[in-house]
Image (tube, rainbow, N blue to C red):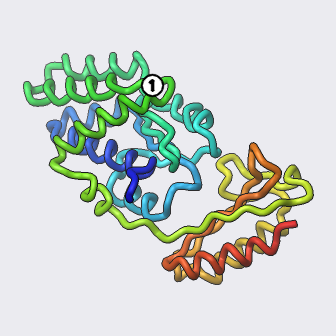
Amino acid sequence: MKIIDGDYQTTLFAKFLKLLIENLSNSIKQIFLEKLSLAIITTAYSNGGFFQYVQNEIKFLKLILAKTGVKHLHHKAKNYDIAIYFEANGHGTIYFNEKTIEKISEIKNSNLASENDKEILILISDFLKAFNPTVGDSLSVLICAEKCLKILNLNCSDVYDLYENIPSVNMKKVVKDKSIYVSNEDDSRLIEPINIQNKIDEIVEEYKNDLGRCFVRASGTEDIVRVYAEAKTSEIAQKISDKVFELLY
């Protein structure tokens, strides 16, 4: 069974928003992108395949990393007019505010906007209003996903074909004192102990041609440290994870 997780939900909604914006006239599209700040907020747990897709195909949305936990994504999202944010586990929504809707309305009412522009801008506004910008609402997300699939003429299998997930491994290790493991502002690197982060960098460098990526973070709810690793094959991802696992104490 395949699940449309947070990465794929973000991809679907970003692709739909991209379609609408690209169908605006050049002048209105330029004004829209100048007046409104747009972003995708995610965490280090998002798959490398997702990162590559967004950076290559959805370039008008700024890609921002936040600490693990939907409250941290929401906090970052508030810095933008429109921010799509979903954790890999599916928790999230599309953030916007009253000023966002006002800006879209101002653009729609400008003399430069054609009838087609106005229809698209109304659709963008209505699309945003379907989401709860304060907290994720699974029902509204489901309904919006169905609408996006229909308008984009896609099915769930097509969404999985947009990009291929890089094999990943999740491990956890019970440690003596998890508090000594201090991560940076987006959990992608350790600030302390720096010697462990340096060794992780060396291990990842060894597998850089195999799409190697790895980070560790102390759990916020359990007395453990979590290890996440990626590589072009599950076997290599496991090797990276095992090597990093042995560094933890």
Above or below — where is 194 with respect to 220? Answer: below
Question: Residue 44, located in which quarter of the rendered image?
Answer: bottom right
At x 80% / y 75%, what residue is drawn? Answer: 246
Q: Give the left or right position of residue 228, taking residue 162 as reference.
A: right
Above or below — where is 56 with respect to 34? Answer: below
Estimate the x, y position of residue 141 in percent, counting from the top left: 37, 34
Q: Amino acid at mark 1?
A: Pro
At x 73% / y 78%, what residue is drawn? Answer: 243
- In this rendering, the count of numbered labels is 1
Estimate the x, y position of residue 213 in percent, counting from the top left: 59, 69
Question: Residue 217, located in which quarter of the rendered image?
Answer: bottom right
Q: Which residue ends up furthest to the front in the rendered image?
A: 1
Badge 1 element: loop
Quarter of the image where the N terminus is located: bottom left
For label 1, the crowd category at 10 Å Cα-Cα, with few meaning under 14, some 14 to 19 and many 20 or more, is many
Camera-side residue of 29 and 173: 173
Estimate the x, y position of residue 131 in percent, counting from the top left: 37, 27
